[in-house]
Amino acid sequence: MTLHIYDTMAGQKRPFTPLEPGKVGIYVCGPTVYDMSHVGHARVYVAFDTIVRYLRRKFTVNYVRNYTDVDDKIIKRAREHNEEPGVLAQRFISEFEADMQSLGVAPANLQPRVTDHIKEIVDLVERLIKSGAAYPVDGDVYFSIEKFPTYGRLGRRRIDDMEAGARVEVDMKKHHPMDFALWKAAKPGEPFWDSPWGKGRPGWHIECSAMSAKHLAESFDIHGGGKDLIFPHHENEIAQSEAASGKTLANYWMHNGFVNIDNEKMSKSLDNFFTVREVLEKFDAQALRYFLLTTHYRSPINFSDQSVREAEARVKYLYETLARMDATITDGPTAGTYREAWVGDLVAGFEATMDDDFNTAKVIGDLSEAFSLVNDILDHPKDKDTDARTLRALRTAITEIGSVLGLFTDNPAVVLERLSSRRQKDAGVDPLAVEDLIAERAAARKAKDFARADAVRNELAAMGVVIKDSPQGTTWEMA
RNA sequence: GGCGCGGUACCCAAGUGGUUAAGGGAACGGUCUGCAAAAUCGUCAUUCGCCGGUUCGAGUCCGGCUCGCGCCUCCA
């Protein structure tokens, strides 16, 4: 099986063939940095992080993800905060990067900013004017969609139909109501750059055309983003880029589904969004990442506290299993027979699943069997050599798969400690007091005073503490 | 109105036309345990929104209906 990618342009999965053998150029639309990132952003960048990690196994990947750091919303927000737009944008870039780091999203190869590409943008707009695809009016420049016959192809819509719906504001300056701005004349107090059309700034879509051409090529392999960018953002990018270059902008268009709240799209306008930061105050970042990957990237995912809590419980199980495994595992060969023959096929199965349009949900499902087997071996040892070899093979496979998912690569003990300490803090539990009670219970148990031991355990339970007895002693954790 | 996506068990969720419809959670039962917890094993959808069609065979393809969501305006 070769890699198949669902291409929005084709409306179906297509076998992936890079333009240049062994290399992949991918551009993903980055955030407009005017506020804290929310879970919807987390989904896009976790999804494409995972996709790129997987692609890197097979290709040399050039991953470009931009920052849109000048735009109407940034200007508006800066005004509200009485802050320079550039300063505000930089602040939210830093916050975004902190969130991404928490989520294990690796930086792209390049993270270009619009304000560093004004020259390229102006050049591109000039080319479009020269070719007749764009026209200046009073310091603005518009793209003329009638000069681009395939306009609407990505979003599968006809210009006539869109006009019928006509929520488009009629602007007499435009030749056609659907024409969109490439360059906007600066209003007083707005940030501006000099241009042949006067002082102004780039329109919303042109930056991605300019930056993808500069940092990848006029034609590259994959362009991605959230589903809401299909129209008009990506449609307009195609129009601008292809009108200028005469080449296909991207060979594959990938779009991820929305994050929903109560089955409605999470969005600023509905005011039903959660920032990454507030979610991470309640839950571990690995739990959020795990949750996002348990649904296929193209499907909608319903976000709720309960679902992330469940994800966190599962993450805890997974890391506990890893911790147990790591405490027992020994050095030695991994080749040979295993307790279960399928252990040897784990990575191949993983690849086959990821090759089918990056089905992380199935990957995670398939991994369950591996984790169960780890615990089974630890609880019920059989042949010593076979068991040891099987554990090593499992650990290797889990690490390899996890390095693509962005899971299981942290030290399990560190993750478990992180989970536990936040729960303790939330519940206001003092570890020393817990230890004292556990010691008291141990004494009671030694004296076979089980009534007393159970009373202590109930006391701990009331604090939210659950204890586990084992031959090595008693451990505890937050419920 | 136009276009697109989806409806799989109590909940989440995967599913390339073909033996018994992944996996997780919950629930119930067994093992382990002084009892628990954790772990593990087992049970848990004759059925995939509804109706019709194609096919030797359909959750998977086609048509209709229905419900939900999204895009068409800034949005990841």
Image: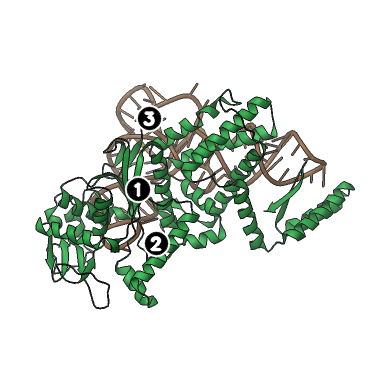
Chain colours: A green, B brown
- Horizontal arrangement in the rendering, residue A316 relative to residue A166 (left or right): right
Question: Label 3, label 1: how many angstroms apart (C-alpha)?
Answer: 24 Å
Amino acid on which disc 2 is placed: Ser
Q: Which of marks 2 and 3 is nearer the N terminus?
A: 3
Residue A196: numbered disc: none
Marks 2 and 3: which is nearer the front? 3
Count of numbered tags: 3
Marks 1 and 2: which is nearer the front? 1
The residue wearing badge 2 is A267
Amino acid on which disc 3 is placed: Met
Asked whether residue A419 appears in the rendered view, the answer is: yes
Determine if marks 3 and 1 fall on one subunit.
yes
Residue A63: numbered disc: 1
Residue A1: numbered disc: 3
Q: Quadrant of the N terminus of chain A?
A: top left
Amino acid on which disc 1 is placed: Tyr
Asked whether residue A165 appears in the rendered view, the answer is: no
Q: Which chain is mark 3 on?
A: A
- Say what secondary structure mark 1 lies in: strand
Q: Which chain is mark 1 on?
A: A
Crowd band around label 3 with a 10 angstrom C-alpha radius: few (<14), some (14–19), many (20+): few
Residue furthest right as drawn? A447
Which of these two is toward me, A418 or B73? A418
- Say what secondary structure mark 3 lies in: loop
